[in-house]
Image (spheres, rainbow, N blue to C red):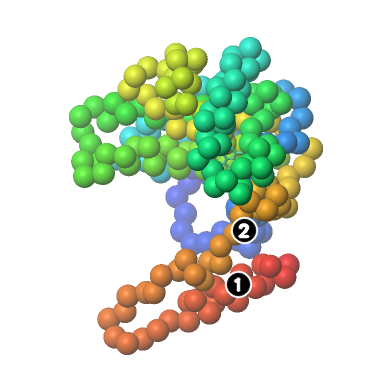
Amino acid sequence: MPADHTHASSGCFDTAAQDAVYRAIFTRRDVRSHFLPDPLDDEVLARLLMAAHHAPSVGFMQPWNFIVIRDLQRRQKVRDLFLAARQQELPHIAEERQALYRKLKLEGICESPLNLVVTCDRSRSQNSPLGRWHNPEMDLYSTVCAVQNFWLAARAEGVGVGWVSIIDREALKQVLAIPEHVVPVAYLCVGRVSEFALRPDLERHGWGNRLPLAELVMSEIFGGDGESGLKETVTGLCAGRTAA
Ligand SMILES: Cc1cc2c(cc1C)N(C[C@H](O)[C@H](O)[C@H](O)COP(=O)(O)O)c1[nH]c(=O)[nH]c(=O)c1N2
């Protein structure tokens, strides 16, 4: 690892470390174009996988596995699945948005030097569903936490990641010989990039905008009739970020 993080500690990070965390969060992008063909160093990939493996998981289940696909022929097969799935998705998109949908680049399966599938082994808790008895899908959510750790660490290492979900899951399982009880949660395109876009691709192409955070923060529940200034603070923060 770049630094030793194994000691217990209390309190907050110093300002530079805090900035680095927020920088990774705010500059992370879903990458579909701008992949460079250069192979990804095993040392770097190992660090990213280590970051993923330190995600929180329900009952400390750690339900993930990581399938690394470098073989181009296999990736071409997956790309064919994507193309078929995209055709199937199209008629379900609002008619007035279909032309834009057709133009969007929504994968970098063959352009990126490697693909990574993050899977969830649903049998790993061995009949001890701590934290999952009422909510059995928590193992899938845990796996998504691993994906996000990978994504943020990748950004810090200058590695682009793009998630492709326009793929028929059962067909993908067949192509990759994934066993019945294992769910492919995320299909990721991974590699060095020529640039990270400043804004999400879907925003730049007019598909959607970031929703105002203040509208998503629900009223807090207070014992008395107090109202906190949280919404105003959030609004101020958002205004500052927009201006920056
Ligand atoms: C579960 C899930 C599934 C997908 C995605 C994301 C997530 C979380 N995204 C990426 C998505 O479009 C992107 O995150 C948003 O547009 C916001 O952009 P940034 O990630 O901030 O760059 C995505 N992108 C894409 O090009 N093809 C896809 O199939 C998917 N699928």
- Image coordinates for residue 108, horizontal then vertical, percent: 67, 30
Instruction: Locate the C terminus by quadrant.
Output: bottom right
Question: Is residue 54 positioned above or below 220 on the image?
Answer: above
Q: Residues within 10 Å of mark 2 (few under 14, many from 20)?
A: few
Residue wearing tag 2? 209
Residue 149 in view: no
Residue type at tag 2 = Asn
Which element type, helix, strand or loop, lies under badge 1?
helix
Instruction: Locate the N terminus by quadrant.
Output: top right
Residue wearing tag 1? 237
Residue at 47% in and 26% down: 168
- Image coordinates for residue 218, horizontal then vertical, percent: 41, 70
Q: Residues within 10 Å of mark 1 (few under 14, many from 20)?
A: some
Residue at 47% in and 66% down: 216
Question: Is residue 92 positioned above or below 78 on the image?
Answer: below
Q: Residue 87 sits in which quadrant?
A: top right
Q: Residue furthest right?
A: 194
- Image coordinates for residue 82, horizontal then vertical, percent: 57, 26
